[in-house]
Amino acid sequence: MFTIGKITNRYVLNTLSFLIIGLIGIGDYYTGSEFSFSIFYLIPIAGLAMYQNTRYFSLLINSLFASVIWFLAEYHSRDYSHVIFPLWNAFMRLIIFYSFGLLLLYLKEKQFILMTANNNLKNLNEEKNRIIGTAAHDLRNSIGGIYSYSKIILDEHKADLPPDIVEAIDYLHSISSNTLDALRDLLDISKIESGKVELKQENHNYMEFIK
């Protein structure tokens, strides 16, 4: 954020808004009824409302200034039967300017809240993926040890063990194998969600696969 000492740029922006409104009023005065500058008064107010440090009071002051400038330009460049008509127009324009600015300010605040919530969700999702990845990796090492040793026992000592022990070890081996597959899938999902998945290209004969 641009700063000058302790003065933030909202003061600079308010000054710029006043200047633009004044220039629009001058153009409105010299063109008279030949060209309408009504929509141009909303441009600096819209810019002020969309700025992140804008306050309601600043919006009201700029809306009031725009309606006064429009009143002066209109009153001195057009003919009216009574001064009440341009005054009434100026009052209604003040309401329109301020309401328009409030609407943009409200939408900006809602957008900021939504962006903050999205960032929080993104951070929570990244933390969740990190925890899942760490837990799955640690579990895979432990389950991998059970899988490997149970396989060694079945391959080398199956004939020396009672049938019920073999059945229990075989069941343990099968369960650990399924758990490893689930942990690999979990790690893959964690990598995909965190955007760290690595694709490995391989050549395949799809005609043989189809046959």
Image: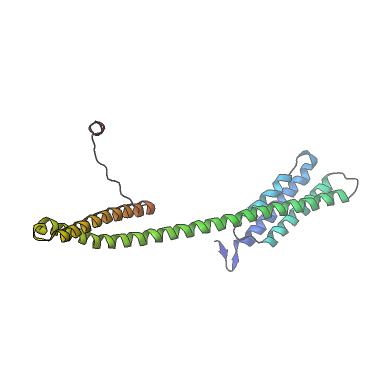
Query: 73 above or below 60?
Result: above
Task: Give how far across and how far down residue 125 sits, in percent.
Answer: 42, 58
**Residue at (84, 51) in percent of width and height:** 88
Q: Position of residue 179 (x, y in %)?
A: 28, 56
What colour scheme has been applied to the protein in the rendered image? rainbow
Judge whether residue 2 can be spotted in this image: yes
Is 116 placed left or right of 51 in the picture?
left
Do we see residue 148 in this rendering?
no
Give 168 or 97, whichever is nearer the viewer: 168
Q: Single out the residue that lies furthest toward the bottom.
A: 6
Q: Residue at x 23, y 55 (%)?
A: 174
Q: Position of residue 116 (x, y in %)?
A: 52, 59
In the rendered structure, the answer to whether residue 198 lies left or right of residue 117 reads: left
Q: Position of residue 83 (x, y in %)?
A: 88, 50
Along the viewing direction, whichever of 193 and 3 lies nearer the viewer: 193
Q: Quadrant of the N terminus?
A: bottom right
> In the picture, residue 52 is in which quadrant?
bottom right
Residue pictured at 55% horizontal, 61% vertical: 2
- Decide if residue 67 is on the left or right side of residue 122: right
Viewer-side residue, 99 vs 73: 99
In the orientation shown, which residue stands out farthest toward the right? 81
The answer to which of 144 and 127 lies nearer the viewer is 144
Q: Is residue 174 left or right of residue 44?
A: left
Total numbered labels: 0
Residue visible at 81% across and 47% down in the picture = 74
- Identify the image quadrant of the C terminus: top left
Quarter occupied by residue 68: bottom right
